[in-house]
Amino acid sequence: MTRNFHRRTFLRGLGTAMALPWLEAMSPLAALADTLQDPGAPLRSVFLFIPNGVHQSEWSPQGTGREWQPSAILEPLESVRDDVLIISGLAHQNARALGDGPGDHARSAACFLTGAHPFKTAGDDIHAGVSADQIIAASCSDRAMIPSLQLGTEGGRQSGNCDSGYSCAYSSNISWAKADQPMPHETQPRRVFERMFLKGSAAETSSARRKRISQRASIVDFILEDAKRLERELGSNDRKKLDEYIGGVRDIERRIERLEDLEKLERQEGALPDFGQSASLGISEHIQLMHELIILAFRLDLTRVITFMWANEGSNRTHPHLEIGEGHHTLTHHKGNQNQVDQVRTINRWQVTEFARFVKRLSEVRDSEGSLLDSTIVVHGSAIGDGNRHNHDDLPVLVAGRGNGLIDTGRHLAVEKNTPMCNLFLSMAQAAGSTVKQIGDSTGTLPGLGA
């Protein structure tokens, strides 16, 4: 016999509490309490930051509205064309020098979500602004177990000089709780995963972790007994969903272990005859794994707001998986060198491919009456336009997801030149329930987002 369950039902075991994805048994009566507190479907926001701008002359699509044609860099969007809104014409005025001289990379990251001009210092007197993700998180903090998640793939210092007199804190953070308080990102998938599931006292959590590591067991093993009990009370469709969910969690654990094993091997000099190939697996796998953790966090409604720095601003990471051994930042200073231009274009196209892959995955995961993508807004971009020129106008901005009706996708929206990017963020914040009237240098909400 089946019965209804609350949306916040957990499977429990030693030091473990695993939230459940949406099940048919949670609707409609079981979800009534949640609906009274949180009317409508949850609105989720994801900000994906890419460093060093793009090769701008080959980025912008041809045509506007629904008749747009992709550039060579944007061709991978064809697979998710109907789920994406391309926006051109947005700018970050406060990422410009404004008398402070060099330091465009540091200003790009610091300004990306704050819209603020960072105070130029390499000391501890940093000052930027409150970021859009934190403003959105504050509007729904009472409805999320984790107010917000900050993710990255590269660690970063929070002090010292990283860009022409700008603190490393600026280059390494896009999320700011206060003007002088950046929110450092987590780069290790294992820690993100365990933050989702390890619950209980410190002693119990520590005991569970030691036992699991010593036995090379899955976190799923600790909740299996509770899962079997729950299955007896579910209908056939929900049993299938629960099995698929538990299998998916196991798969993420295996992928985390694979990435960790790969990193260990790469640190052993001479351990791998084909070092380049192993490194290529690490970069792509790291980003894709973080994307799966984002999906998992949203699916379990653990948080509503996530930022993910694919790399720190000014990153000079190589891309051996693309057969590119020279650093990304170095390549963007190509001064017209065609070989370097070709490599930047290849990196940008790969970035768009990974974005499209993520969007596709969001569209495949069911949540209540639709997909996760229906209730999510994904913003992908940079506060540098062209990496060679270091301009901060005509920024490369891709938006995916419908955001519960806020976004009309499948189009290229060309807004008035130098429209503040913060106008987009203000629209998102107000849609999430915030009462703020301004974010950074916003001049109002962004027209043209909806149908």
Image (cartoon, rainbow, N blue to C red):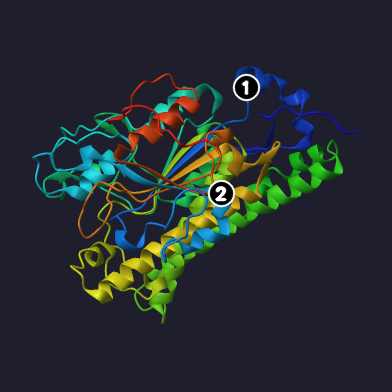
The number of numbered badges drawn on the structure is: 2
The reply to whether residue 212 is in sight is no
Q: Secondary structure at mark 1?
A: loop
Q: Nearer the viewer, residue 400 or 152?
A: 400
- Residue 431, placed above or below residue 218: above
Residue 159 location, quadrant: top left
**Which residue is depicted at the point 65% across and 52% down?**
248
Q: Residue 365 placed where, x, y %?
A: 65, 47
- Residue 393, placed above or below residue 9: below
Q: Secondary structure at mark 2?
A: helix
- Decide if residue 366 is on the left or right side of residue 268: right
Labels 1, 2: front one: 2
- Which residue is the site of mark 1? 39
Q: Residue 199 placed where, x, y %?
A: 57, 35
**Which residue is depicted at the point 60% across and 40% down?**
374
Q: Nearer the viewer, residue 445 or 126?
A: 445
The reply to whether residue 175 is in sight is yes
Give the residue at the far bottom of this rendering: 273
Q: CA–CA distance between discs 1 and 2?
A: 24 Å
The residue type indicated by label 2 comes to Asp
- Residue 127, placed above or below residue 272: above
The residue type indicated by label 1 comes to Pro
- Which residue is the site of mark 2? 83
Q: Residue 107 placed where, x, y %?
A: 21, 43
| Circles 1 and 2: CB atoms closer than 8 Å | no
**Which residue is depicted at the point 42% across and 58% down?**
62
Q: Residue 440 placed where, x, y %?
A: 29, 30
Q: Quadrant of the C terminus?
A: top right
